[in-house]
Image (cartoon, rainbow, N blue to C red):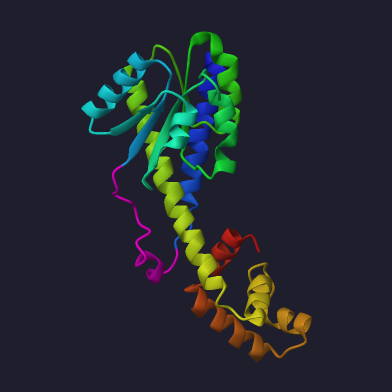
Amino acid sequence: MIEALRRISSRRRHDRAAAEHTSVYLSTSLEMRDVGRMEDDAIVHVIDDDPSMRRSVESLLRSVDIVARTYESARAFLASEQPDLPGCLLLDVRLPGLSGLDFQSQLERLGIGLPVIMMTAHGDIPMTVQAMKAGATDFLPKPFRDQDLIDAVAVAIERDRVRRIDDQELALVRERYALLSDREKQVMAFVTNGRLNKQVAFDLGLSEITIKIHRASGMRKMGARTLPDLVKMAQLLKL
């Protein structure tokens, strides 16, 4: 069972690497919006009902210059004010009240995008499999090695940094897309789905030169240097 979990974790790392490899690179104006690698401080939120575990983890992370905040329950975390910084949740599977698994299942609905690392006792391995399938970035069977925790936290924080960059990219693309006229949006949808200018002209009952004008105007507003750039933006928008 442990080996199965490790395979799940390995696949997730592979998927993250592939996602980063195919991430969208927008125009210079996007770069000027500071969507490069964020250098903000990160915070690890440790949720565990065991006070000694909370103190131990907080001390370990502090020793490698990582800020940690600790909570005795998921409800305590939700009741606290959270800074808008990269980080992750270090979450015990078994918690009083709202369990770790139940809390994890509610994160999306609550608008919490922080990656989750599950901590578990050996007997909770089947529950951890469920957590990994639900999107947890890693699992740490108790007792775990210090380095395993540090490594898992580093991966989760980096994943959150990438997510935040992706969110900024998407917000900017949506902002630019809203500036397009209805006709420019039509043309963008056609050309990013592989249609040639003359085919789009026929479909819309317009001249080819008119399509070229709308296409050029749309690309300028979107900040797309090339058609592949525009295609990537359309994929982000799910056109």
> Please, is residue 167 above or below residue 151 in the view?
below
The answer to whether residue 57 is above or below residue 20 is above
Q: In the rendered image of this protein, does residue 183 appear above or below residue 165?
A: below
Where does the image place residue 190, in percent across and percent down from the top left? 69, 73
Image location (x, y in percent) of residue 130: 61, 24
Is residue 229 something that shows in the picture? no
Quarter containing the C terminus: bottom right
Q: Is residue 64 left or right of residue 48?
A: left
Q: Is residue 37 visible?
A: yes
Kindly identify the residue that appears in the image at 60 percent across and 65 percent down: 234
Magenta-highlighted residues:
26-41
Q: Nearer the viewer, residue 72 or 86?
A: 72
Give the prevailing secondary structure in the magenta stretch.
loop
| Residue at the outermost front position | 79
Q: Quadrant of residue 152?
A: top left
**Horizontal side, residue 193 vs residue 119: left or right:** right
**Left or right side of 102 for 75:** left
Whole-percent x and y of residue 167?
48, 54
Q: Is residue 119 shown above or below 77? A: above
Q: Residue at x 55, y 14 (%)?
A: 125
In the rendered image, which quarter contains the N terminus?
top right
Front residue (pair 73, 103):
73
